[in-house]
Amino acid sequence: MWIYVKGKALEVVKAILPLTVVIIIMQFALVRMPVSDFLQFLAGAIMVIGGMTLFLVGIETGILPMGEAIGSELPKRRSLWLIVGIAFLIGFAATIAEPDVIVLTGQIDEVSEGRISHNMLIYVIGIGIAFFVAMAMLRIVLGFRMAYLLMAGYTLVIILSFFTPDEFVPVAFDAGGVTTGPMTVPIILSLGIGFSSVLSGRSAISDGFGIIGLASTGPIIAVMIMGMIVS
């Protein structure tokens, strides 16, 4: 176990180190921020390395196997409504726990001075993701092509962009981007892979992947609709 944690720690260090080095160089060459702020940055970088290591270990040892187990168990229940409902709940729960989503909604709440509420936005994003995760599971069951859902989703995005208030359009697209974070992606992917792996005649690669690309259209559509309603 220690060797596994050490390996993950090295992966995180390799990912964080380039950004840290760039900021250190900028500090001494250009920025010259106060020493207290610079030390706070270094302390934060160390905490990020520790936190991300534990986070990734937890994802791979607990959440990924559980997602695949749930996905492989759902088809055995032979209930379409249960499959759709569980997929919706998992998509929603994973999204509102996503660190990227929490950061984005907090910043938008601050910049908009409360006009776009943190709580309202995070729940809207969660519902958008959850709806399209449920549709992705339904697609696997019914066997129609992913391209049809993607085409319908992005066509709707283009149409809504003409009617959405200008300040909500960039928020909507950023909402779609932040949902592809370290919490949401492993859970949804493992759910789809586990689900498709137990269906006869299905490929876990062709059916289990593409869910994230589809699900990321959900927050875009949901935030655009929210923008038209609140405005």
Image (tube, rainbow, N blue to C red):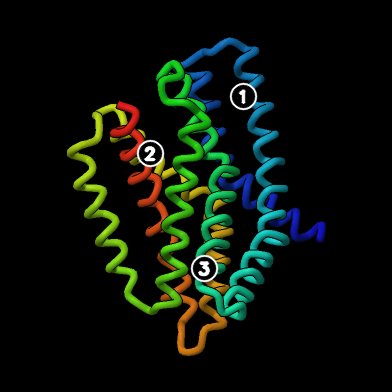
Q: Residue at 50% x, 28% y: name it.
A: 118
Q: Residue at 20% x, 37% y: name it.
A: 163
- 55 vs 210: above or below: above
Which of pointers 3 and 1 indicates the residue nearer the eye?
A: 3
- 96 vs 57: above or below: above
Residue located beneath label 1 in the image:
41
The residue furthest right is: 2
Is residue 52 or residue 171 the one in the foreground?
171
Which of pointers 3 and 2 indicates the residue nearer the eye?
A: 3
Picture coordinates of residue 206, whole percent (x, y)? 41, 76
The residue furthest bottom is: 201
Q: Is residue 121 left or right of residue 2?
A: left
- Proximity of marks 1 and 2: CB atoms separated by less than 8 Å: no
Q: Is residue 81 visible?
A: yes
Q: Quadrant of the N terminus?
A: bottom right
Q: Quadrant of residue 59?
A: bottom right
- 196 vs 161: above or below: below
